[in-house]
Amino acid sequence: MAIMLGVDTGGTYTDAVLIKNDHEIIASAKSLTTRANLAEGVGKAVSAVLKESSINAKDIVMTSLSTTLATNALVEGKGGKVCLVYIGFSAKDIERQGLADALRGDPVIIISGGHNHSGNEIAQLDLGTLRRELSKIGTVTGFAIAGQFATRNPSHEKVVRDVIRDHTGIPVSCSYELSAKLGGPKRAMTAVLNARLIGMIDHLIGATEDYLRSIGINSQMMVVRGDGALISSDQAREKPIETILSGPAASIVGASWLTDEKNALISDIGGTTTDVAILKEGKPKIDPDGALVGGLRTMVEAVAMRTFGLGGDSQVHLNREGLMGELSLGPRRVMPVSLLAVDHNKIVHDALDSALNSNKTNEFAGQFLVPVSDNASELSDRDNIVFSRIKNGPVPMSEAIKTRVDLGSVSRLLERGIIMHSALTPSDASHVLGNLDTWDVIAAQKTLLIFGRKRTGSGEILSKDSEELAQRIIDQLTDQTSEVILETAFGEEDIDGRARDLARHTLIKKGLKHHRNIVSLDAAINLPLIGLGASARTYYGEVGKRLSTNTILPKHGGVANAIGAVVGQITMRKSGKIMSGGEGVWRIFTDNGPIDYNEQKVAYDVLREGLLHKVKKAAKNAGADDIRIQFEDSEQVATIEGRKVFVEGSILAIATGRPRISE
């Protein structure tokens, strides 16, 4: 009997599931994710499934982890401070492909060097400038390196990597190791995001592995990649960017396993995001353009999924410009006040009561700031002053912000993940309506009453009735969820127009309500909707009705991510290029630079053999057994004066296998 443990660490909940012999769920459990000490939340969830199943921890032969932490960090603009070393590019290139947005003002070192499209050096590498600039860089958590045409010749990136490691000892991310595609700025952005995530993912994996070992689980731990495949925990530590969309990808694998549906829309609602994808012929589609998360297009191979900053813990906002008091949700996740009150009852209720008994209006009433980390080494003096008011908290937001300038400090502390924001969310509204009873209902009611005192654009009070306001918040969640599902659906249709605009078009809204007048309008989703996530059963019944489609809510849909983590397989891909190096010359590109051959067949054979070795090694390092390898070849030719001329060829090697099971 083979017992496998799946764990998913999300923004709000950590899930655990035990599966026997690859086909039977024998236990599942949820626990709150503990940001300050991730092992605590993992421990509670794992302990619960072991207790429920009476399984001995030592009998578990494989553990697999999926996580939304990397995805959430990019959506919310969080992560460590990094430095980009840009080789052979100009300052203008930083403004391309979203690189400036990814950097968020972090330092950049630009040095000469780089190669051309044929892999030949175009400028000498300037190590002198590199060493001088490194001595000026303040505290950073990681370095990213991107060289011009490094995928054709990575030698300059390798040299710079070694210099930085010798000089700083800080983790380094090389762009050529993250993608084999051309496009320097986009590759640089991918390296920047990878470097930004290293500390966060390393902490999660380390905390999880330490806990598992402490209870006697010594089997290898796998991590779900963004395409739904599994990799070893060591590989995930080196390339955390590959874990973006890990949780959502695992949910697709889990949804397919749970429902046996071959074609469906899958929508997974978490605390921070709603992730929507389309299942075709039983398999998730891989995005050919790279994963898009938080508005940033990376070069990471991942499921074709749209991720939206919308979840059960999204902050509720009032549009003050609207006369009628329009609400909106997200994109940032906050801690529900009803949840904060569970562990900090007196602090929360004293602040809420004070706000309710006051005749003065405070824009921060009913909101709190919560310390998560005490690592303030990279903060400015001003930010440290503000953090000193919060570090022993939680504290009411009004006590931390004394002037408008302090808002900038709070924003930076939030971006770095040093503090969390607690405010009104749909989860609080669900407690007031009786749809949830997990946390502090009274705290939720008080928070809604405080929020209801806000003035609309017409000067009227938003609401005096906590239940009426709560229902409006849930209705808004239904509206926004329906829109993001429609946007995903339109993105797959061959229809002129932006998917976002079409999903929000007046005619579509009328069609969803089955408008009947002079014109008859109908609109609906023509695939079943699989609703996943802890709160899917709370919200998705209404979403399905709104979209006029059959809604499937699997029994274990609340832990689909953890299930997908267990039932997935290891898949490694390695690709290589062959270009014409001139008449009778075929050039292949390797990690050691370009190599020329006088025979096309020899060039192909050498490239294929090299890729076979690399992909097989990668699969073995990932912990795969019974490895199967297949190749996909393509060739581009041009017709010149009636004669076909070779331009470029490519080989993709794919290795697959199930994770190695411990004895």
Image (tube, rainbow, N blue to C red):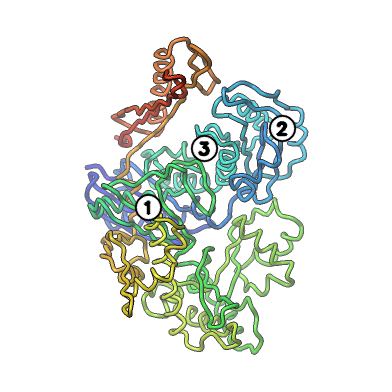
Q: CA distance from mark 2 to mark 3?
A: 25 Å
**Front-lying residue, 633 or 252:** 633
Question: Callout 1, which amino acid?
Answer: Asp
Question: Callout 2, which amino acid?
Answer: Ile
Question: Callout 3, which amino acid?
Answer: Glu
User: Is 267 on the left or on the right of 27, as rendered?
Assistant: right
Q: Which residue is mark 1?
A: 494
Q: Secondary structure at mark 2?
A: strand
Q: Which label lies toward us, 1 or 2?
A: 1
Q: Which residue is mark 3?
A: 238
Crowd class of label 1 (few under 14; some 14 to 19; many from 20; radius 10 Å) = few
Q: Position of residue 143 (x, y in %)?
A: 63, 39
Crowd class of label 3 (few under 14; some 14 to 19; many from 20; radius 10 Å) = some
The residue shown at (43%, 71%) is 506
Does 459 sit above or below residue 417?
A: below
**Which quadrant: the C terminus?**
top left
Earlier along the polypeptide chain: callout 2 or callout 3? 2
Residue 41 visible in the current orientation: no
Earlier along the polypeptide chain: callout 1 or callout 3? 3
**Front-lying residue, 393 or 404:** 404
